[in-house]
């Protein structure tokens, strides 16, 4: 007997009929761990890339300031904010790893 929500495309049944409690889909902690691991990795890589971009933009602004104090201050702010953001990102990374170790979850 087919389930009302069953969808079959070719040889693939996209909604298998569940016959008992033992066949219920399970994800659990391992799937959550993989999602968090992937998310933290993507966020860390994004933060590093953005830090590098803002360091480069700050350096270019510093070089091209031509002695203008406003442009120099703007470039200095970019570099300082990029450094502060990177330190906060690394702190968050270490906190996530410490919490993960406490609960027995390996993120990296």
Image (cartoon, grey):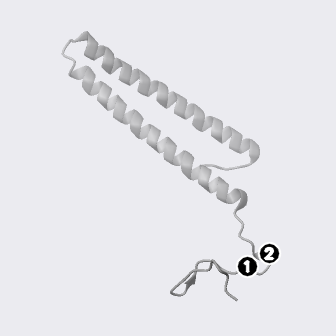
* Along the viewing direction, whichever of 104 and 35 lies nearer the viewer: 35
Q: Is residue 35 depicted above or below 17 in this figure?
A: above
**How many residues crowd mark 1 within 10 Å: few (<14), some (14–19), many (20+)?**
few
Whole-percent x and y of residue 48?
44, 38
In the picture, residue 25 is in which quadrant? bottom right
In the orientation shown, which residue stands out farthest toward the left? Answer: 66
* Along the viewing direction, whichever of 22 and 98 lies nearer the viewer: 22
In the picture, residue 93 is in which quadrant? top right
Eye-nearest disc, 1 or 2: 1
In the orientation shown, which residue stands out farthest toward the right? Answer: 21
Kindly identify which residue carries mark 1.
Answer: 18
36 vs 18, left or right, is left
In the orientation shown, which residue stands out farthest toward the front? Answer: 4
Look at 62% across and 56% down and name the residue there.
Answer: 34
**How many residues crowd mark 2 within 10 Å: few (<14), some (14–19), many (20+)?**
few
Look at 53% across and 47% down and name the residue there.
Answer: 41
Report, in whole angstroms, how far the alpha carbon at label 1 lies from the one at label 2.
Answer: 9 Å
Kindly identify which residue carries mark 2.
Answer: 22
Is the Cβ of the residue at disc 1 closer than 8 Å to that at disc 2?
no
SS class, disc 2 = helix
Look at 72% across and 60% down and name the residue there.
Answer: 28
């Amino acid at each position: 007997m087919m389930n009302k929500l069953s969808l079959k495309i070719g040889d693939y049944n996209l909604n298998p009929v569940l016959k008992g409690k033992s066949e219920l889909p399970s994800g659990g902690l391992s799937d959550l761990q993989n999602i968090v691991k992937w998310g933290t990795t993507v966020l860390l890589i994004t933060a590093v890339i953005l830090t590098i971009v803002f360091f480069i933009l700050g350096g270019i602004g510093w070089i091209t300031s031509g002695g203008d104090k406003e442009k120099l201050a703007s470039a200095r702010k970019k570099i300082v904010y990029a450094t502060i953001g990177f330190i906060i990102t690394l702190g968050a990374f270490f906190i996530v790893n410490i919490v993960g170790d406490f609960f027995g979850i390996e993120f990296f």
